[in-house]
């Protein structure tokens, strides 16, 4: 049988007439019927030669492959409908401006927003922003299921998706509106504009140290400062306000100094810990992470983490936290006070604010309370859960002197 590819009559593989073009090419089928990864989601004009239409081998029309093509057609149609809805027109190539059309074509298929960071695509070319991609992987991990693309349902993982650098470069060049002054600037310069250049960015009064609570556009700051009520305060009131500010600064300095005192403490240990995923025996089988046994101060320990404080179905919650507890596995007969905290490991990009905790271990109390791992937000939790395992650097302090950090 002749295996030379031929046109599918009057329609291409994606269901469009040969003289029309879909809004965004998401995938193609090779002559053998296998999927071909679209290396970059490319933009096309409303007309193009018919030789660019989908091709398929006459020998590859098996029922299984036909079902796969039908499923892909339905997924692509649904995605185009969502993006047309975002655009607010019945057709992406209608009256909308070029910028709006590009925004609709290049947005994430999950949140329908343009990402200013990484953009990933599945094997069939559907785009996902980094936050949504990590959220999908985290949901799959919590459900103990394979994560799938929300458009075409192919499996997604760090091994099967790729970053679409072409789309990222286009997004960086697209204009977006400043949230303060409503002027348009390229995405690549928007961060600097909003933080340093925008005349309407929020600014505190320069007399904030002496009690002024004003917060307004920077362009209005000189006018406010010339009439600020703090200018009429008495010397005694100003001294009291400065004393309050100094008290707050002293408290922060105390925490800073106590932290360094602990680092110079005689009995200190820090360990690189690797957390491996496990599941509980009871149904539903909830995900938790646990380290292997490690030695510190001639005693055996493990660290255990859980998601959302052992919530029954954490994948139903968009707000997520990871908590951990320190468990002593060696028998002791005298109580001992332990200060400890978890920090990110070498080469880690996870954002966290380490917080010190304290617990007194005894013969009968060998498990600490659940403590927050102190990741900055739920997106960081999803990034951590998206990996098979993760590493942290764990610090422990024990000795005759006890240093307590006051929050």
Image (cartoon, rainbow, N blue to C red):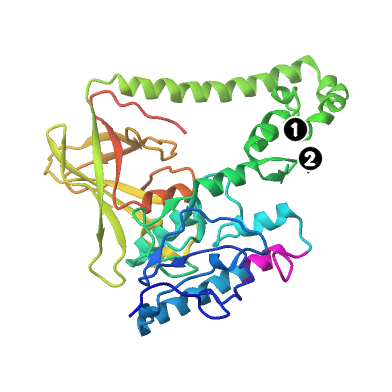
Q: Position of residue 252 (x, y in %)?
A: 51, 25
Q: Position of residue 45 (x, y in %)?
A: 66, 59
Residue pointed to by mark 1: 198
Residue 389: which disc? none
Who is closer to the viewer here, 33 or 109? 33
Per the rendered image, the range of residues in magenta is: 81-94
Quarter of the figure with the N terminus: bottom left
Name the outermost residue toward the front: 2
Q: Position of residue 288 (x, y in %)?
A: 29, 57
Q: Is residue 92 left or right of residue 375?
A: right
Judged from the image, the secondary structure of the residue bearing numbered disc 1 is loop
Residue pointed to by mark 2: 181
Q: Residue at x 22, y 24 (%)?
A: 267
For marks 1 and 2, give the CA distance: 7 Å
Q: Residue at x 53, y 73 (%)?
A: 14
- Who comes first in sequence, dot 1 or dot 2? 2
Q: Is residue 256 visible?
A: yes
Q: State if disc 2 and disc 1 touch (CB < 8 Å).
A: yes
Q: Is residue 86 magenta?
A: yes
Q: Position of residue 292 (x, y in %)?
A: 17, 46
Q: Is residue 39 magenta?
A: no
Q: Crowdedness of circle 1 by 10 Å Cα count: few (<14), some, many (20+)?
A: some
Name the outermost residue toward the bottom: 63
How many numbered callouts?
2
Judged from the image, the secondary structure of the residue bearing numbered disc 2 is loop
Which of the 4 image quadrants contains residue 232? Answer: top right
Q: Residue at x 47, y 71 (%)?
A: 55
Q: Crowdedness of circle 2 by 10 Å Cα count: few (<14), some, many (20+)?
A: few
């Amino acid at each position: 049988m002749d295996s030379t590819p031929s046109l599918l009559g009057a329609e291409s593989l994606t269901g469009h007439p040969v003289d029309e073009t879909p809004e965004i090419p998401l995938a193609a089928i090779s002559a053998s019927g296998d999927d071909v990864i679209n290396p970059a989601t490319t933009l096309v004009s409303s007309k193009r030669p018919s030789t660019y239409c989908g091709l398929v081998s006459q020998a590859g029309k098996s029922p299984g492959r036909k079902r796969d093509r039908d499923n892909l057609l339905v997924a692509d149609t649904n995605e185009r409908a969502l993006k047309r809805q975002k655009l607010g027109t019945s057709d992406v190539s209608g009256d909308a401006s070029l910028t709006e059309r590009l925004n609709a074509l290049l947005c994430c298929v999950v949140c329908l927003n343009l990402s200013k960071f990484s953009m990933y695509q599945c094997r069939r070319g559907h785009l996902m922003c980094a936050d949504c991609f990590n959220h999908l992987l985290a949901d799959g991990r919590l459900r103990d299921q394979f994560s799938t693309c929300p458009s075409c349902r192919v499996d997604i993982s760090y091994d099967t998706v790729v970053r679409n650098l072409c789309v990222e470069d286009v997004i960086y060049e697209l204009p977006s509106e400043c949230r303060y002054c409503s002027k348009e600037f390229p995405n690549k310069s928007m961060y600097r504009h909003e933080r340093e250049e925008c005349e309407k960015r929020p600014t505190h009064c320069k007399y904030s140290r002496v009690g002024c609570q004003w917060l307004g556009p920077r362009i209005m700051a000189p006018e406010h400062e010339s009439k600020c009520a703090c200018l009429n305060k008495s010397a005694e009131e100003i001294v009291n306000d400065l004393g309050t500010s100094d008290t707050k600064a002293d408290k922060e300095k105390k925490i800073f100094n106590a932290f360094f005192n602990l680092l110079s403490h005689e009995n200190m240990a820090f360990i690189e810990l690797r957390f491996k995923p496990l599941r509980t025996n009871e149904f539903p089988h909830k995900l938790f992470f646990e380290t292997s046994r490690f030695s510190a101060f001639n005693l055996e320990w493990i660290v255990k983490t859980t998601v959302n404080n052992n919530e029954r179905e954490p994948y139903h919650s968009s707000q997520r936290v990871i908590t951990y507890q320190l468990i002593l596995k060696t028998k002791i007969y005298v109580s001992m006070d332990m200060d400890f905290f978890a920090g990110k490991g070498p080469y880690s990009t996870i954002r966290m604010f380490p917080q010190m905790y304290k617990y007194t271990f005894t013969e009968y109390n060998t498990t600490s309370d659940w403590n927050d791992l102190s990741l900055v937000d739920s997106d960081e939790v999803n990034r951590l859960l998206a990996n098979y395992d993760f590493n942290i650097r764990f610090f422990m302090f024990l000795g005759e002197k006890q240093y307590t950090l006051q929050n």
